[in-house]
Amino acid sequence: MYNFILANRVALDLNSWFAKIKDEFYINFIAEDRYMYLVKGLWMTLRITFFAVLLGIALGVIAAIVRSTHDKTIKEMRPGLAKGLLIFFNAIVKLYLTVIRGTPVVVQLMIMYYIIFASSTNAMLVAVLAFGINSGAYVAEIIRSGIMSIDNGQFEAGRSLGFNYIQTMYYIVIPQALKNVLPALANEFIVLIKETSVSGYVGIMDLTRGGDVIRSRTFVAFMPLFAVAAIYLIIVVIFSKLVTVMERRLRNSER
Amino acid sequence: MSADKNNEVIISVNELSKHFKNKTGKIYALDGITTDIRRGEVLVIIGPSGSGKSTFLRSLNLLERPTEGTITFEGVDITSPESDINKLRQKMGMVFQHFNLFPHLTILDNMTLAPRKLLKMSKEDAEAKALELLERVGLLDRADAYPSQLSGGQKQRIAIVRALCMSPDVLLFDEPTSALDPEMVGEVLDVMKALAKSGMTMAVVTHEMGFAKEVGSRVIFMDEGKIIEEGTPSEIFDNPQNERLQSFLAKVL
Ligand SMILES: Nc1ncnc2c1ncn2[C@@H]1O[C@H](COP(=O)(O)OP(=O)(O)OP(=O)(O)O)[C@@H](O)[C@H]1O
Ligand SMILES: [Mg+2]
């Protein structure tokens, strides 16, 4: 008899716990289509990350070429306009790398949004620029290490056939360097997708901000924030798996 | 096979020097080299390690910048700042000790890249020429392979025909067989012999004294950045004058 009551009470507790979960789930995600904050936020996060990665790679390649060209050839160069330009651009790139890597990305984002592009109404574009410029500084180092890892004999073989410096870089060195650092570049995507979570600082409705908006409407923190965390985690885990597969493929194609 | 003494001079090297600076001062890798290379000639450069053979060869196509002296190639002073170094290199092929094939490209693409991009040859023409050359060195069936799938000897044969695809007037070889397993040296030397026979002008740094004797039209012995002795293979190998050359030959022969 006593056991029966106890079991009943546990069942009742469990029942009410499930009911509470269900209620919370309903109020956080279903009511007023609140799940759309997460869906739209995720879409925004993915778009910002994607375009920022593209911009970052473009800037990174340019910065890496300037830096490695300078380091490789400046001693051999004859004085003249080309040498002066190279020194100038190398200094600019160095400044870019130092400033970007020496300041928090969220500060860079706010400076871009509230000062440099204060007149812009397209917050997403500003975010793409800010994160892309930020990412470019890290990508530059990745690609520079890729270029430096290519045997100098490759470079000399290109030059000895009659290719000029740029052509040798373009046809021979960069394709090999990019292939070598592809996993590191994919990793940059993983880093960046998490970094874009500060987009809310400039009023962008990204995934993190979406969850936070739900929290502020429902006054329940647990569900929306864990949902946001879970979504990031799933994307990162999937992407890490892809990187691992890619690394294995690349290694296999070497021999 | 010795080149006609009356053949035109194709490369003229005059008082060429190259120094590297270090803490204690200047090291002269080349110290006043003067010599001519004539069309159709096979110039063999020998000497102990560190004597400046590579630096000399690499100066000829300006992979090393000489610090003093001049090099005239087909009548043009290539050491002058106005000369178009990339154009000149198209006419002067180079074969390296470590092959330096492009690992991201197939054999065929390794060979056609430069003719297509630099000589603006059509894909068909460039490939036809490459396939013909591949057939000559017995590697036609490897056209679609990647360099990593080839043996060392095969790689070096490809490196030679890759240079030939640009139809150069001169071919420079820096120890082309030194990185090869002994059983593969022969196949590469055979290709080089055939090239010499066909009249190609060649400058070859090598430790293969047999090759120097058999194929060389002239041999230069270098030591400490200078040409110590110069002559026909029989003069150098059978009747060496300088004592440094004598002791060098005693070691390598
Ligand atoms: N980049 C460099 N910096 C400083 N010294 C150098 C450099 N390259 C060559 N040297 C020096 O110049 C000299 C000639 O070198 P080089 O490579 O031409 O000799 P080599 O005859 O080709 O020798 P090996 O048979 O070992 O290839 C050597 O004393 C070498 O140490
Ligand atoms: Mg050498």
Image (cartoon, coloured by chain):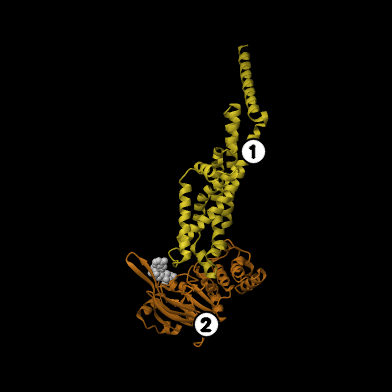
Chain colours: A yellow, B orange
Q: Pointer 1: what residue?
A: A40
Q: Dot 1: within a 10 Å radius of its alpha carbon, few (fewer than 14), some, or many (20 or more) residues?
A: some
Q: Are marks 1 and 2 on the same chain?
A: no
> Which numbered circle lies on residue A142?
none
> Which numbered circle lies on residue B39?
2
- Marks 1 and 2 close (CB-CB < 8 Å): no
Q: Which picture quadrant has residue A9?
A: top right
Farthest residue to the front: give it: A119
Q: Position of residue B213 (x, y in %)?
A: 47, 81
The answer to whether residue A223 is visible is no
Question: The N terminus of chain A is located in which quarter?
Answer: top right
Secondary element type, mark 1: helix
Q: Residue at 44%, 81% (x, y): give it.
A: B35
The answer to whether residue A178 is visible is yes
Nearer-the-camera pick, A20 or B152: A20
Q: Position of residue A64 (x, y in %)?
A: 50, 56
Spatial CA distance of label 1 from label 2 is: 73 Å
Q: Is residue A6 left or right of residue B173?
A: right
**Chain under numbered label 1:** A
Nearer-the-camera pick, B187 or A188: A188
Nearer-the-camera pick, A129 or B19: A129
Closer to the eye: label 1 or 2:
1
Amino acid type at circle 2 is Arg
Nearer-the-camera pick, A176 or B175: A176
Amino acid type at circle 1 is Lys
Question: The C terminus of chain A is located in which quarter?
Answer: bottom right
Secondary element type, mark 2: loop
Q: Is residue A178 above or below residue A25?
A: below
Q: Quadrant of ligand 2?
A: bottom left
